[in-house]
């Protein structure tokens, strides 16, 4: 029996195989850090009098608590200011490379790794952040870890873990126009549920996946965690190599050729068996929007808010009832009749240059609807911001009536000043629509950048075809 991609990467990193059901010890090639989940890890190291084992395999950036306006002024929020200064002090003390606010390489950690060429095929990558699965788009085994594990990796560059189960999600065929990576992943989660991938590494396969750009692949792998999976992966191919070539940390010359030779071996064998397998036909997909309070509560944009009674599963029925109440929606209401207040385009799911281009292409020549309170466009990193400005996208956003911000997690979660007020409704290109995620009492509809932009024009949930 052959091995899957995830198993190959795991086996290549085995320091010690666990015997009699004991966990394996695996080597970690790259640890990424941000201000939220690192303080106790550094503190633990300090208390134990230890130093990072491989500081050169560690990189920190600031993203969650960073403001996206007035970044040259003192941070008005004392909690955020403390988080950011603590990271800076810790990085200085332990010699960790940090890209802090104001640095052109600052940005959301899951954008910074790939754009620097640090996230590479076949690597093991960790971060104290659930969306570390993003880096799996490169064929890396990348997953979120807890703070005590962050400390363990800092101290030893290894992790003690039981192997993950494997799951294949096949998406075959041609995507209809205006259907994007975000719609694919929302459709997958709606199909398998928020627990569908639990304990598994999902490998996304099939002709529709192979046709996606690296940025789109990152969007898909990013949300693996919303299906409960430990990680998401896509086998590296020419698209991956093309993205990496010439990036600051990509191998060069002979090393590049050697690396590509190895990377080409990173795919599941034809006779590999996955613990679970699911298939979707790309032709059947539509732009997807969530109506509820978890990322699995999504439907095609041209359908209606489902009736909780239509769920046969008791837990799902109860969850849907509660979600409709929280979201202030009625069963049977057309999705396209829902008016929104705020539009958020950004996050580690959809804040990359291709996402901003997609939003700008829809917005160009239009203005936001009067009923829309605000449209926030937040690049995932400072480099993305610089690139967007080079292409004149910032002008399009400003002419549209949107706010063009600095890089960070922003309105993806309420850890910085970019928040919704209670009962405010957003359409958001981020990845979580939990109760209160974008601020206390906030209501979130997840969608693609194109759908978010079309909604900003019409004021009600819309797709580009409606314009
Ligand atoms: C703050 C951090 C630990 C958290 C995560 O793990 O994902 C955040 O990034 C999120 O998206 O909710
Ligand atoms: S953008 Fe959102 S999902 Fe991504 S790391 Fe930041 S808070 Fe988490």
Image (cartoon, rainbow, N blue to C red):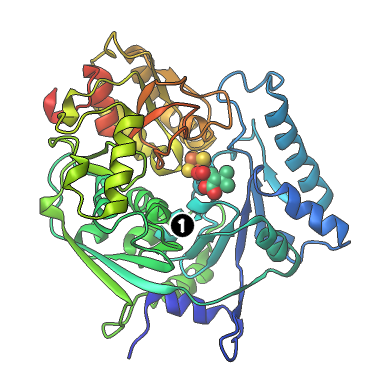
Residue occupying the point 51% across, 82% down: 11
Front-lying residue, 435 or 258: 435
What residue would you read off at disc 1?
A: 133
The C terminus sits in image quarter: top left
164 over 246 or under it: above or below: below
- Position in image of residue 250 (x %, y %): 52, 59
Front-lying residue, 192 or 467: 192
Residue occupying the point 41% across, 30% down: 388
Q: How many marks?
A: 1
- Position in image of residue 68 (x %, y %): 55, 25
48 over 104 or under it: above or below: below
Q: Quadrant of residue 389?
A: top left
Q: Is residue 257 left or right of residue 124?
A: left
- Position in image of residue 415 (x %, y %): 58, 32
Q: Is residue 181 left or right of residue 240?
A: left
Label 1 CB less than 8 angstroms from ligand 1: no
207 over 343 or under it: above or below: below
Residue occupying the point 75% across, 51% down: 40
Toward the top, the furthest residue is 370
Secondary structure at badge 1 equals helix
- Position in image of residue 51 (x %, y %): 82, 62
Answer whether residue 303 is visible to the viewer in this image: yes
Q: Is residue 280 left or right of residue 188?
A: left
Front-lying residue, 426 or 59: 426
Q: Quadrant of residue 276?
A: bottom left
The N terminus sits in image quarter: bottom left
């Amino acid at each position: 029996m052959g091995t899957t991609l995830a198993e190959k990467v795991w086996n290549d990193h085995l320091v010690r195989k666990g015997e009699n059901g004991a966990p394996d010890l695996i080597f970690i090639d790259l640890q990424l850090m941000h201000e939220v989940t690192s303080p106790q890890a550094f503190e633990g190291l300090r208390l134990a009098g230890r130093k990072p084992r491989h500081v050169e395999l560690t990189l920190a950036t600031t993203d969650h608590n960073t403001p996206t306006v007035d970044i040259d002024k003192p941070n008005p929020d004392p909690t955020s200011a403390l988080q950011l200064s603590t990271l800076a002090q810790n990085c200085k003390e332990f010699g960790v490379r940090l890209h802090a606010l104001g640095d052109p390489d600052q940005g959301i950690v899951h954008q910074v790794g790939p754009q620097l060429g640090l996230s590479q095929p076949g690597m093991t990558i960790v971060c104290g952040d659930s969306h570390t699965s993003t880096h799996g788009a490169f064929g890396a085994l990348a997953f979120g870890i807890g703070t005590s594990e962050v400390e363990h990796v800092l101290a030893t560059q290894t992790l003690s873990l039981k192997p993950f189960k494997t799951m294949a999600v096949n998406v075959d065929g041609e995507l209809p126009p205006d259907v994007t990576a975000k719609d694919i992943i929302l459709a997958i989660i709606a199909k398998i549920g928020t627990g569908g991938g639990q304990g598994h590494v999902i490998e996304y396969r099939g002709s529709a996946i192979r046709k996606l750009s690296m940025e789109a692949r990152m969007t898909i792998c990013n949300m693996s965690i919303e299906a409960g999976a430990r990680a998401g992966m896509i086998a590296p191919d020419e698209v991956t190599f093309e993205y990496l070539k010439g990036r600051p940390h990509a191998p060069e010359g002979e090393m590049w050729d050697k690396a590509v030779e190895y990377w080409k071996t990173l795919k599941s064998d034809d006779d590999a068996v996955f613990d679970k397998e699911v298939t979707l036909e790309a032709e059947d997909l539509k732009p997807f929007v969530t109506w509820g309070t978890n990322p699995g509560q999504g439907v095609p944009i041209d359908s209606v808010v489902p009736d909780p009674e239509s769920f046969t599963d008791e837990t799902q029925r109860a969850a849907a009832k509660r979600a409709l109440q929280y979201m202030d929606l009625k069963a049977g209401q057309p999705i396209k009749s829902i008016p929104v207040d705020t539009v958020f385009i950004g996050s580690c799911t959809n804040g990359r240059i291709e996402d901003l281009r997609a939003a700008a292409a829809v917005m160009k020549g239009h203005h936001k609807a009067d009923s829309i309170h605000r449209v926030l466009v937040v690049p995932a990193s400072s480099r993305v911001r610089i690139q967007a400005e080079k292409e004149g996208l910032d002008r399009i956003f400003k002419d549209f009536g949107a706010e063009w911000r600095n890089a960070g997690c922003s309105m993806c979660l309420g850890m910085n000043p970019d928040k919704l007020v209670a009962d405010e409704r957003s359409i958001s290109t981020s990845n979580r629509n939990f109760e209160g995620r974008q601020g206390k009492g906030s209501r979130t509809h997840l969608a693609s950048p194109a759908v978010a932009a079309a909604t900003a024009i019409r004021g009600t949930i819309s797709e580009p075809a409606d314009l």
